[in-house]
Image (spheres, rainbow, N blue to C red):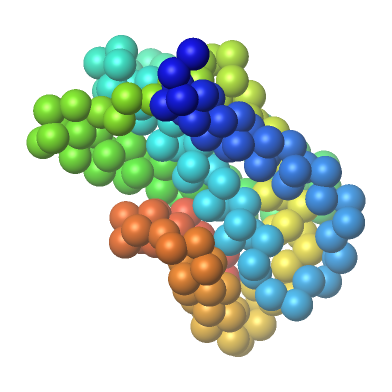
Amino acid sequence: MPISALADRGRIAGVMAACVFLASCAAAQSETPSDFSRLVELSAARLDISRQVALTKWDSGSPVADPPGDPRDQQVIAAAAAQAAERGVSPELASAFFADQIEASKLIQIALIASWRRAGEAPSESRADLSAQLRPALDRLRPLFIDELKATRRLREAPECRSRLANATADHVRVHHLTPLFAAALDRGLARVCGD
C-alpha cells in the first residue's frame, strides 16, 4: 500500500479516534468548568468530520443541503432536544445549538467543495463512509455536547459569556493553526451559546 494511502487512512482513523477520546473524557469533566475550551474542542472535532463529509459529497456529486423531504437535519435537532430534556438542559437551547452546528458544517462543506471545484480536484485521500462511519461519529458527539452545555450553564448565563467564549475560540484557533474558514465555522457553530 502506498505511503500516501496509509497517511490518508491514518487521518480518517485520527478523526474517529478523536471522537472516541472525547467520549472517554466526558466522565472526567467537572460540572463547573472554568472556561469553554471543551465546548470549542468538541465543535472543532465536529468540523473535522464535516470535512470528511464534504469529500463524500464531492465524490457522489450530492448537494451539501439535504434534498427536500430528507428529514436528517430535523431528526438530529429533535434527538438533541429530547436528549437535552432528559439531562436537564433546555430543549430550546439544544435545538438552537444543534441547528447552528449543522449550519457550521454546511459552511465548511460549501466552502471546501467550491475550492475543490476551482482547483479542478479534491484531495486524493481515503474516504470514510458517510452512513457507516461519519454520521455515527457525529451522533456520538451529541451527548458530549449536551453534557457540556449543562456543565457550562453558569458561564453561559454570566455577563462575560461572549468574551470568554471568544477567548476560548481564539485560543483553539491559535494553538491548532486553524484556517480562517474553520475559525469562522467555529464561530457559526457557537453563535447562540451565550444568552442575551
Residue 51 appears left or right of 30: left
Q: How many marks?
A: 0
The residue that appears at 12% across and 28% down in the rendered structure is 120
Residue 58 in the image, given as x and y percentages of width and height: 28, 22
Q: Left or right of 63: which side holds 148?
A: right
Q: Seen in the image, is 42 located left or right of residue 108?
A: right
Say if residue 141 shows up in the picture: no
Whether residue 7 appears in this view of the structure is: yes
Q: Decide: is 82 above or below 29.
A: above
Which residue is drawn at the image coordinates 51% and 24% (left, top)?
6
The residue at the point 49 percent across, 13 percent down is: 1
Between residues 187 and 71, which one lies in front from this camera angle? 187
Task: Give percent across and percent down for residue 14.
Answer: 60, 36
Toward the viewer: 54 or 17?
17
Q: Is residue 73 left or right of residue 122?
A: right
Where residue 62 sits: x, y (%)? Answer: 29, 17
Kindly give the residue lying farthest to the bottom in the view shown.
159
On the image, the x and y values in percent for residue 108 come to 35, 44
The picture quadrant where one finds residue 111 is top left
| In the image, residue 116 above or below residue 126 | below
Q: Is residue 96 above or below residue 63?
A: below
Q: Which residue is drawn at 53% across and 74% down?
A: 171
Residue 16 in which image quadrant: top right
